[in-house]
Image (tube, grey):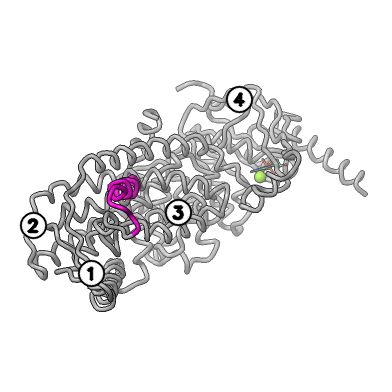
Amino acid sequence: MWNELRELYRYRELLWTLVLRELRVRYKNSYLGFFWSLIVPLVTVAVLTIVFKRVMGMVIPNYSAYVLAAFLPWMYFQTALLDSSQSVLAQIQLVKKVYFPREVLPLAAVLANLIHFVLALLVFFVYLLGYVGAPLLPSVVLLPVLVFFQTLLIAGLSLIISCLNVFYEDTKYIVSIGLQLMFYLVPVIYFSEQVYHAQLASPEWQRWIYLVYHLNPIAMLMTAYRKILLPPITVQQIGAVQKQTFASLPMDWGLLAVACGVSVLIFVLGYAFFNKRKWDFAEQP
Amino acid sequence: MKDTAILLEHVSKSYRLSHQPYSSLKGILLSMFRYRRRIEVHQALNDVSLTIRHGETVGLIGVNGSGKSTLLAIIARVIRPNAGRIEVNGRVAPLLQLGVGFHPDLTGLENVYFNGIILGLTRQQIAERLPSIVRFAELEEFIDTPVRAYSSGMVLRLGFAVAVHTDPEIILMDEVLAVGDEAFQHKCLRKIQEFQHEGRTILLVSHDMNQVRQVATRTVWLHQGRVMADGAPEEVVTQYLAFTEEMERRAI
Ligand SMILES: Nc1ncnc2c1ncn2[C@@H]1O[C@H](COP(=O)(O)OP(=O)(O)O)[C@@H](O)[C@H]1O
Ligand SMILES: [Mg+2]
C-alpha cells in the first residue's frame, strides 16, 4: 500500500489536473456556475423547513440552519459516490492505453466534490453569522477533523464502487438506490434525539437503538456536524395527540471515535480492494 | 542508458472469455445457478521473446487478433502478462487513437494540458512547448474552441502533436496513422524519421506494408500470439504477404 501511495504522490499533478477538469466541465455550459451547486441545497432546505414547521409542527428556532448543517455533508457524500461510480468506466479508453495509477480517477471525483463542499460550508457560515446571527461555537475548530474523516470514508467507498462498476454495471444503480434509502437512515430531516426517543422503544432499548444507529459512520458524522456547528436545542413537535419534547443529547465522543476509526478502516480496505483489481480494468472488453 | 530499450522473455498473456459476461447482475445470478461456470481462456500471446535496442524502428505486423495490441499494452504497462518477464528502459508514450483522452466540452488548449500531463509532462513543460504543439497541429485559430467543433482530422492532429512533444524515448503506434489525410500522413512520416535520427525507439503496428517497408528498420510478424518471423522488413513482409495469399487461396 505504501508503494501505491508513493506512486500516487508521483502522479499528484495528474490528480489535480483531473480535479480541475471535472470542475471546469461541470460548469462549462452554465451561466450560474458554482451557484447551481448552492441552489440545490438551498431550495431543498427551504422546502424542508416549510414542510417540517408548518405541516409536521416542529417547533425549532432556526430549523433551516440545523437542516443545512447535516444536508451539506450529505450532499457531499451522495454526489461524490454517484460521480465516482462512473469515473473509471468513463475513461476506459484511456485506461486501456496509458499507464497511470488508476485510483486518480475516483479520487479526482471525490476531491472535486470536496471542493464544492468546502465552498458550500463557507456560504453556510455567511448565512449563519449574517442572517441567523448565531454565535460561532468554539467546537467549530473540529470541523476540519470531521471533513477529513468523512473524505476518507467517501474515498474508500468510491474506490470500491468505481472498481466494481467496471466489471458489473449494475453497481451504479445499486449505489443510487442505496443512497436514496440511506437518506432516511441519517439525521437530515430529523434529529438524532428523535431516534433516541423512538416511540416503539422501551427506555432500556433507547440507548441501544441510538448506539446501533450511530455505528453507521456517515450517520454519526452528520450528528457530529450538527453538534459542533450549532448550539444544542430542544426539539418540540406539536402532534395531533400530544406535544413531544426531545431534549438535546450531548456529543458521544466514543461513538465519534468509532466512526472515525471505521472511516479509516473503510479507506484502507477500499484501497486494498481497488489495488487488487485495478490492473484488470484494461482487460475489460 | 542501457543498450536494450525493451526486453521480453517468454511473455504469455491469456484473456478470460466468459460466454455469459458477468458485466450484469443477471450474468452473476445465472452463473450461480449453472452447474459449472464455463470460462474459456484465450491465449493472446504465447511465449514471446523479443529484444529491442534503442534507436530501432520495429514494424509489428500480423492479421487481426494476432496479439499486436496486446503486446503494445504489455509494453505500455497497461496490462500485466501471466508469465514471463519484461523490462522497459526509457519513457514510453503511446500515441492515442482518435479522440481518446479528449473532452468535447473543453477547448483544444485545455485538452492539450490534460493529455500532456497524462502522458507524463509537467504543466511547466507543456507551457513551454505549447507554441510548437499548436503549430504542429496547425490549429492556431481553433485552439480556444471546444473540441466538439473540431473535425476528426483536427482532433487527430492535436492528439498526435501532443504525443510527439512529450519527448518519449519509446513511442508506441497502434494503427494510428491510418485515419489522417495524405498531407498529415506525410507530416507524421517526417516526424517519425526525425525521431529515428534522434535515436528514439518506435514500435509501429500497421497494415500498410508499404509504410512498414518504408520506415521500419526491423519487422516482427505475429501470428496467433507467436513470433513467426523477425528480421529485415523486406524479407518478413514478403513472407507475411505470401502467407496471407496462401490463406486467402485456401479460404476460396
Ligand atoms: N480484453 C480482451 N478480452 C478478451 N479477449 C481479448 C481482449 N483483447 C484482445 N482479446 C483477444 O486476444 C487476441 C489478440 O488481440 P489483439 O492483441 O487486440 O490483436 P491485434 O491487435 O493483433 O488485432 C484476439 O483474439 C482478441 O480477440
Ligand atoms: Mg489491434
- CA separation in Å, label 4 and label 2: 64 Å
Q: Is residue A74 left or right of residue B47?
A: left
Disc nearest the viewer among 2 and 3: 2
Quarter containing ligand 2? Answer: top right
Please tell me which of labels 3 and 4 falls first in the chain. Answer: 4
List the residue tagged with mark 1. A237
Circles 3 and 4: CB distance less than 8 Å? no
Q: Amino acid at mark 3?
A: Phe
Q: Which residues are magenta?
A: A200-218
List the residue tagged with mark 4. B8
List the residue tagged with mark 3. B136
Q: How far across and down, in percent of the image, does residue B66 sit?
A: 72, 39
- CA separation in Å, label 2 and label 3: 57 Å
Q: Amino acid at mark 2?
A: Leu
Q: Amino acid at mark 4?
A: Leu
Q: Is mark 2 within 8 Å of ligand 1?
A: no
Disc nearest the viewer among 2 and 1: 1
Secondary structure category for the residue under label 1: strand
Q: Provide the chain ID for the residue under circle 1.
A: A
A206 drawn magenta:
yes
Labels 3 and 4 within one chain? yes
Please tell me which of labels 2 and 1 falls first in the chain. Answer: 2
Secondary structure category for the residue under label 4: strand
- CA separation in Å, label 3 and label 1: 70 Å
Quarter occupied by residue A54 = bottom left
